[in-house]
Amino acid sequence: MDELAQFVAARLDEDAQAALTLLGADARIGFQRGVPAPRWEVQPGGAIRSADGTLRVRFTWSDEAMHIVRHDPATVLRDVEAKRRILDEHAIVHRDVVWLEKDGEEIEERSAELPVCGRCVSKNSAFHSRGDVPEGPCVTVRLLALPHDDHPDYQEEWRP
């Protein structure tokens, strides 16, 4: 796993851990056994409860309540899983890549084994020039890292 993918995976692990921490022991055990985490719901009077009835927030304003419910642990855990699958889909592979290079008046075919996104650069890909080869992490992985650009480990060269 390349450095950017490791960075994104670490942030996903942190999000999942934070969400799991908010679940009760029974829900955490159930989640580990494949039972979906209970959704949070706004109750009359501004309280927020888990679908299993556990009181999560005693009172909040309606706009805050909607934000909290939209980012409840169940939603966060599903989001983390989806992003992990995207990260896996866009893993770096070493692939033989072909490009064209002008040598004087002649155009020659060149190739090399390069680290590229296995999803975005298919086998037997050919490019017009070496500069067109999208080497390293693709834009998709860079976009997954972007919400964490304020993290001390974020590197500016990852910015899409």
Image (tube, rainbow, N blue to C red):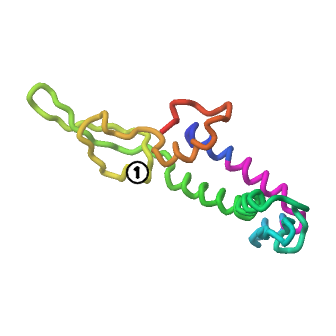
- Magenta part mainly helix, strand or loop? helix
Residue at 38% in and 40% down: 134
Residue 125 coordinates in the image, percent (x, y): 30, 49
Q: Is residue 129 left or right of residue 95?
A: left
Q: Residues within 10 Å of mark 1 (few under 14, many from 20)?
A: some
Q: Is residue 92 above or below residue 129?
A: below
Would residue 41 be seen by someone viewing this image from the given angle?
yes
Please tell me which residue is depicted at 68% across the width and 45% down the height of the picture.
11
Q: Is residue 73 visible?
A: no
Query: Which residue appears farthest toward the left when viewing the image?
Result: 105
Q: Amino acid at mark 1?
A: Cys
Q: Is residue 22 magenta?
A: yes
Classify 94 as above or below 60.
above
Q: Which residue is mark 1?
A: 120
> Would residue 44 appear left or right of 106 to someone viewing this image?
right
Toward the viewer: 48 or 131? 48
Magenta-highlighted residues: 12-27
